[in-house]
Image (spheres, rainbow, N blue to C red):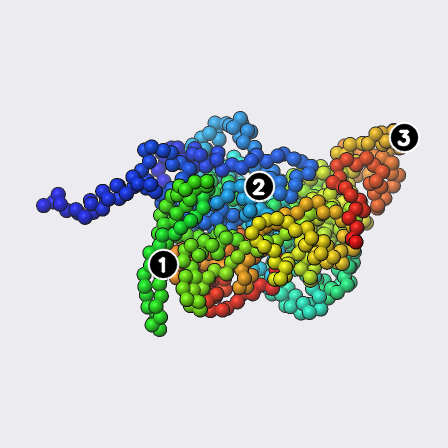
């Protein structure tokens, strides 16, 4: 009897239809759902900062057929009030201690240089990133001089244009520096400087809208996943998880939309740890891969803006003292922006973004004034605070899939140098998603599995 | 993709309107650090200035694709002009390669002890180049040429270049200026007048060029404050003669200065400056290295609290 063929299929269809009428379903004859995200998306990117948008851009750019992949970017706050991207000082440098970081920065510099080719939209004006090609000047004391020399050698091998300067050369070139205690300095000559991160963000959003990426304002509250139990060759029991749905809750309401997805990208910045916990990363006995959490937590960092009438001139690079204090020029009016990273004991409470001006008085100003005597007389104009998505393990990014939650990819944990590496990291994650392996820059030292195996990819030159 | 697809939903639907953030303030002088970028047009002008082409682009995928292709072709054209001539470099050396590059773009080249050369109607004859293999290039006039960051490779190989003119080059921007440090040993004269993409941020990396004696930074539309930039560049390069805007341009003269202006005599114009740049520095007879900024009624500098906030 042909009419009873596929009876089970028909029943499940009817069941699905009935289910769709209930809240959370797709049927909506009574009210408007245009503010809700779509019900289905191939890739859901959690986090709409520069890293999330960069991953979305490269996914759309590297897809095999135009329109093949549907990408949804979920961002909790469209004003970006607490996002690390827009609160960043905006520097880009190649002076790192890991070759992968140098390569990432080099590609990102090339991306920023040709930004109007990469992010060109018909009928829209070209982007002006306000890039200052003034370079970074890292100073090293006696202990750090040998490491700096080794790092510079590696950076030059990778193609960065960095030169080493002795204290005498430094004094001649920048007479406003006090070279006491400085044994060696490394100065970036090309592709280093600072730019406006807000402009990059706007440019990416504009281009993504024209490429057909969907944006949604909401918070990810739940992942619905399915698990399967497997046994490794050595007899160990593993639970592999696969995320099927992402529940996106709307602002100021209890309404949520379950988005069916194939791949989830965790680019939530300072809150990536929470998102990872929601997905079940780290639910297990400690000391196993199951129980290894994502070691990314928000750390508050202050940035101060001051005015100093006799300060360094137009040629001043971004100067980083061996003690950790750094500053750069801002604009033409002798204003400067700078700060210092606190030590572990001085870490401020990341619960809010309040600024502590005492920190400037006690920790930042003395160090700056010691290095640049002109800074003895300055006046603080304003300050703000932002979060680092701080990787407590080795202060380097986490990129690539999770070994057990098989369709969650990470692009986070860059601890203060995420903005300058975002274009390259976006491309790496897109390659991983589309091809399954890194094609241009090999970021295998940055995979999640290093947290379990204890293989640190330590970055020593962080500001 | 169907050629007859209409109604590009991503353009028509809410996302474009709801996700556009607060329109940026067109603030030429002092935009704050976290001020909105000047890159995105305000919504108003987009709505009013709609042409038929823009309307079609917004509604049809195919029109958009064709326009994107044409845009891409333009970019590729410039890139092709700036390719590196590796064969010529290997065969004839870096001087001839650089000269060939400049001449092909429409500029002029001067070898040592020779006259200025330009490409003639018949093209570039290779016969002359064979004689010029070892002769260094002293001066390059690349005014109006489509040189960009990549093409600058060819010029940076000319290690004895003394004079470089990049007037009105549309693709020379701040990133390109960041590469000029490689010519620091020999470069004595540099002209950047009229380049639309150069701003004060790129001028900051000219401090490497310590042998520079003449610098022309007049008529740079992207520089936000020409007078102040001129002062800062002069401080940065003390041995260099900087031609540019009148440093008092853009400043409001204070009431006590108006009588001084009438009394002081203007300085005669520099011999090679174009007529519209005739300089008159009120109150100064020669070029001082320290500017008497306290006496002129400066109303645009962001200074306040001189000497305040001394360390306890």
Q: Residue furthest right?
A: B263
Question: Which labelled disc corresponds to residue A127?
Answer: 2
Check whether the beta carbons of the residues at disc 2 and disc 3 lie within 8 A of each other. Answer: no
View extreme (left): residue:
A1
- Residue at 87 percent across and 29 percent down: it is B259
Q: Residue at x 50, y 64 (%)?
A: A445
Q: Could you tell me which residue is drawn at 83 percent across and 34 percent down?
A: B280
Q: Nearer the viewer, residue A331 or A107?
A: A331
The reply to the same-chain question for discs 1 and 3 is no
Q: Position of residue A243 (x, y in %)?
A: 37, 54
The answer to whether residue A441 is visible is no
* Residue nearest the observer in this picture, A294 or B35: A294
Residue A426 in percent (x, y) is at 49, 52
**Disc on res. A196:** none
Disc nearer the start of the sequence (1/2): 2
Q: Quadrant of the C terminus of chain A?
A: bottom right
Q: Nearer the viewer, mark 1 or mark 2?
A: 1
For mark 3, give the secondary structure.
helix
x and y, in percent, of residue A335 in the image:
72, 46
Query: Along the line of sight, which residue is nearer the eye, B37 or B19?
Result: B19
Residue B296 visible in rendering: yes
Crowd around label 3: few <14 · some 14–19 · many ≥20 (10 Å): few
In whole angstroms, how far apart are the C-alphas of marks 1 and 2? 42 Å
| Numbered badge on residue A241 | 1
């Amino acid at each position: 009897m042909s009419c009873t063929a596929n009876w089970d299929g028909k029943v499940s269809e009817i069941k699905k239809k009935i289910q769709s009428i209930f809240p959370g379903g797709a049927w909506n004859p009574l009210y408007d759902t245009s503010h809700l995200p779509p019900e289905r998306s191939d890739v859901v990117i959690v986090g709409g900062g520069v890293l999330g948008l960069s991953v979305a851009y490269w996914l759309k750019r590297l897809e095999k057929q135009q329109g093949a992949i549907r990408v949804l970017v979920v961002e909790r706050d469209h004003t970006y009030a607490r996002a690390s991207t827009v609160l960043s000082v905006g520097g880009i440098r190649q002076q790192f201690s890991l070759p992968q970081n140098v390569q990432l920065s080099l590609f990102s510099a090339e991306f920023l240089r040709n930004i109007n080719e990469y992010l060109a939209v018909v009928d829209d004006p070209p982007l002006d990133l306000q890039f200052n090609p003034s370079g970074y000047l890292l100073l090293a004391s006696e202990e750090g001089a040998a490491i700096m020399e080794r790092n510079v050698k590696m950076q030059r091998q990778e193609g960065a244009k960095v030169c080493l300067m002795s204290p005498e050369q430094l004094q001649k070139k920048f007479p406003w520096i006090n070279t006491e205690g400085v044994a060696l300095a490394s100065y970036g000559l090309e592709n280093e400087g600072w730019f406006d991160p807000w402009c990059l963000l706007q440019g990416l959003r504009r281009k993504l809208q024209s490429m057909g990426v969907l944006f949604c304002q909401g918070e990810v509250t739940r992942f619905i996943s399915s698990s399967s139990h497997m046994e490794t060759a050595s007899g160990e029991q593993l639970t592999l998880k696969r995320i099927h749905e992402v529940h996106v809750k709307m602002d100021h309401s209890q309404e949520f939309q379950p988005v069916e997805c194939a791949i989830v990208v965790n680019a939530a910045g300072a809150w990536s740890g929470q998102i990872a916990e929601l997905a079940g990363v780290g639910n297990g006995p400690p000391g196993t891969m199951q129980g290894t959490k994502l070691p990314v937590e928000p750390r508050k960092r202050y940035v101060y803006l001051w005015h100093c009438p006799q300060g360094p001139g137009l040629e001043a690079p971004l100067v980083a003292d061996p003690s950790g204090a750094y500053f750069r020029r801002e604009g033409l009016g002798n204003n400067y922006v700078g700060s210092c990273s606190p030590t572990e004991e001085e870490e401020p409470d990341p619960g809010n973004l309040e600024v502590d001006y005492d920190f400037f008085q006690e920790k930042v100003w003395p160090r700056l004034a010691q290095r640049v005597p002109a800074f003895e007389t300055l006046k603080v104009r304003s300050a703000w605070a932002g979060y680092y998505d701080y990787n407590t393990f080795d202060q380097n990014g986490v990129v690539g899939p999770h070994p057990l939650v098989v369709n969650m990819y990470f692009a986070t944990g860059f601890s203060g140098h995420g903005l300058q590496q975002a274009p390259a990291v976006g491309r790496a994650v897109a390659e991983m998603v589309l091809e399954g392996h890194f094609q241009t820059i090999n970021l295998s030292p940055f995979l999640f599995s290093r947290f379990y195996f204890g293989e640190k990819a330590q970055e020593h030159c962080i500001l | 993709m169907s050629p007859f697809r209409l109604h590009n939903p991503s353009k028509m639907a809410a996302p474009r309107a709801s996700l556009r953030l607060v329109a940026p303030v067109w603030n030429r002088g002092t935009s704050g650090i976290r001020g909105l970028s000047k890159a995105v047009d305000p919504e108003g002008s987009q709505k009013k200035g709609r042409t038929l082409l823009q309307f079609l682009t917004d509604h049809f995928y195919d029109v958009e694709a064709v326009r994107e292709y044409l845009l891409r072709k333009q970019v590729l054209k410039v890139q092709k002009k700036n390719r590196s001539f590796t064969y010529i470099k290997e065969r004839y050396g870096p001087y001839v390669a650089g000269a060939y590059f400049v001449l092909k773009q429409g500029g002029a080249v001067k070898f040592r002890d020779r006259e200025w050369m330009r490409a003639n109607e018949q093209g570039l004859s290779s016969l002359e180049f064979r004689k010029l293999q070892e002769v260094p290039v002293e001066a390059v006039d690349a005014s109006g040429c489509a040189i960009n960051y990549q093409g600058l490779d060819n010029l940076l190989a000319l290690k004895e270049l003394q004079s470089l003119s990049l007037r009105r080059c549309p693709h020379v921007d701040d990133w390109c200026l960041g590469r000029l440090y490689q010519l620091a040993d020999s470069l004595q004269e540099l002209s950047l007048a009229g380049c639309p993409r150069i701003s004060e941020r790129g001028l900051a990396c000219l401090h490497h060029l310590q042998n520079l004696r003449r610098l022309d930074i007049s008529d740079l539309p992207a520089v936000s404050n020409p007078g102040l930039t001129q002062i800062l560049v002069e401080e940065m390069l003390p041995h260099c003669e900087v031609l540019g805007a009148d440093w008092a341009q853009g400043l409001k003269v204070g009431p006590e200065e108006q009588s001084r202006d009438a009394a002081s005599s203007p300085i005669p114009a520099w011999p090679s400056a174009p007529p519209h740049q005739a300089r008159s520095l009120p109150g100064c007879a020669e070029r001082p290295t320290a500017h008497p900024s306290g006496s002129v009624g400066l109303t645009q500098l962001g200074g306040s609290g001189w000497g305040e906030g001394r360390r306890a």
